[in-house]
Image (spheres, rainbow, N blue to C red):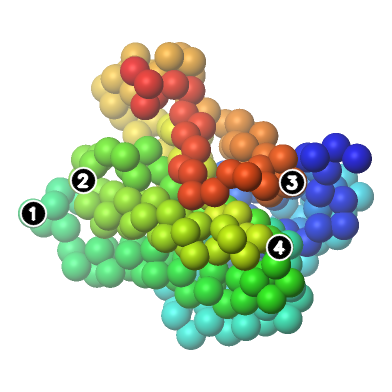
Amino acid sequence: MSAFDLSGRLAVVTGANRGIGLGMATALAKAGADIIGVSATIPSSGSAVEDAVTALGRSFESRAVDFADRDAVMALGDELATRSPDILVNNAGTIERAPAAEHPLEFWDRVIEIDLSSQFVLTQRVARPMLERGSGKVIFTASLLSFQGGINVPGYAAAKSGIAGLTKALANEWAARGIQVNAIAPGYIETDNTQALRDDPTRTRSILERIPAARWGRPDDLGGATVFLASAASDYVSGVVLPVDGGWLGR
């Protein structure tokens, strides 16, 4: 059996309805995993991610949860813990853009809650059965702004820097108990979150000029890293924030 084979594994992917989450869920299903897809807007049936997963012969379930609602996230975590998943991919997130001096506090609070606090709340609960059995994989979606500051996105930069720290903190506690906790830091990927940048010719040109791969990333570019960190191939990898950025950080 390949070390990358996920047959018989159950994976929870948040933010699975589109973009990066859809790409991650599809990659995990291709490797053999069954999927529980979570998103604030995911329909009960007929979603693109359900179609992609079931077309690969894997089972799919959806959960519609607003990650700004702490109580709903806690309830989700408690319910998922009863399913004892093998893999948790924390990909749900949002972004709000405004200059720091005028950045509404509502923007800050919403981004920190969705992109950082809810990630810990869900992971804390889903990881409990993993710790009891002594095995599991937790993958966070970090960002280039886990390393850099960005422009006009102070809450997002703070949250994603926090995700890098949380990844390491949980890895320190759980690696010896059989749980590998790591993160993927996507570069500039063609998703809803980057639409405003891609619509700005000046920003798009400056971004492309810095990416050695000379193109924006696609959601399926995250698939290989996701399967690696979800599989036995990464059993001795812990506390890593892995950039998948076309070479941006090396420039």
Asked if marks 2 and 3 touch (Cβ < 8 Å), the reply is no
As measured in the structure, the alpha-carbon distance from the residue carrying label 2 to the one carrying label 3 is 39 Å
Asked if marks 4 and 3 touch (Cβ < 8 Å), the reply is no
189, above or below 237, in the image? above
Q: Which residue is drawn at 35% across and 34% down?
A: 197
Extreme-left residue of the structure: 101
Quadrant placement of the N terminus: top right
Q: SS for tag 1?
A: helix
Which amino acid type corresponds to the residue marked 3 in the rendered image? Answer: Ala
The one of 94 and 232 positioned closer to us in this rendering? 232
Residue 122 visible somewhere in the drawing: yes
| Residue 177 percent across, percent down from the top left | 62, 65
| Residue 164 percent across, percent down from the top left | 39, 51
As measured in the structure, the alpha-carbon distance from the residue carrying label 1 to the one carrying label 3 is 46 Å
As measured in the structure, the alpha-carbon distance from the residue carrying label 4 to the one carrying label 2 is 40 Å
Which numbered disc, 1 or 4, marks the residue closer to the eye?
A: 4
Q: How crowded is mark 1: few (under 14 residues within 10 Å), some or many (20 or more)?
A: few
251, above or below 12, in the image? above
Which amino acid type corresponds to the residue marked 4 in the rendered image? Answer: Ser
Disc 4 designates what residue? 135
Asked if marks 4 and 2 touch (Cβ < 8 Å), the reply is no
Q: Which of marks 1 and 3 is nearer the N terminus?
A: 1
Give the numbered dot on residue 101: 1
Q: Residue at x 60, y 54 (%)?
A: 180
Give the numbered dot on residue 232: 3
Q: SS for tag 4?
A: loop
| Residue 247 percent across, percent down from the top left | 44, 21
Disc 2 designates what residue? 152
